[in-house]
């Protein structure tokens, strides 16, 4: 659970930096080198997964609720 919070905090910091980019030169600095591009790509993927995965899990649980043994 602790690593999930670490990933969320670091991703939100990077997303905030991406959102606050003022011009194209500032935005291009996130994709200037291969390491920066990899980090920014992972941040975008993590951002999507942090929103989609809990929703997907809740849907799977609710759809399979009748199949679970009590």
Image (tube, rainbow, N blue to C red):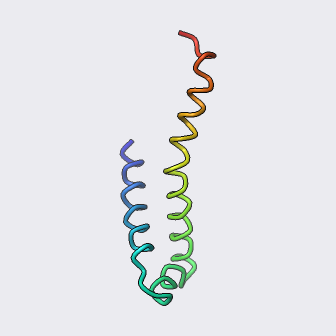
Compared to residue 69, the image places residue 38 above or below, namely below
Most distant residue in the bottom direction:
25
Q: Residue furthest top?
A: 70
**Residue lying at 45% horizontally and 86% vertically, measured from the top left:** 26
* Camera-side residue of 67 and 43: 67
- Residue depicted at x 37% and y 54%: 6
x and y, in percent, of residue 54 in the image: 51, 41
**Residue 41: percent from the left, percent from the top?**
56, 68
Of 34 and 17, nearer the camera is 17
User: Which quadrant does the N terminus fall into?
Assistant: top left
Of residues 1 and 25, the one nearer the viewer is 25
Does residue 58 lie above or below 68 as drawn?
Answer: below
Who is closer to the viewer here, 5 or 54?
54
Q: Residue 8: x percent and y percent? A: 40, 54
Q: Position of residue 29 (x, y in %)?
A: 48, 84
Q: Quadrant of residue 66?
A: top right
Q: Residue at x 59, y 16 (%)?
A: 68
Q: Residue at x 49, y 51 (%)?
A: 50
In the visual, does 40 lie left or right of 9? right
Tally of numbered tags? 0
């Amino acid at each position: 659970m602790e690593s999930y919070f670490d990933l969320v905090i670091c991703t939100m910091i990077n997303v905030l930096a991406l959102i606050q980019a003022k011009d194209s030169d500032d935005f291009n600095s996130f994709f200037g080198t291969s390491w920066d591009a990899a980090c920014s790509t992972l941040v975008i993927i993590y951002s999507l997964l942090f929103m989609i995965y809990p929703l997907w899990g809740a849907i799977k649980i609710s759809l399979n609720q009748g199949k679970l043994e009590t």
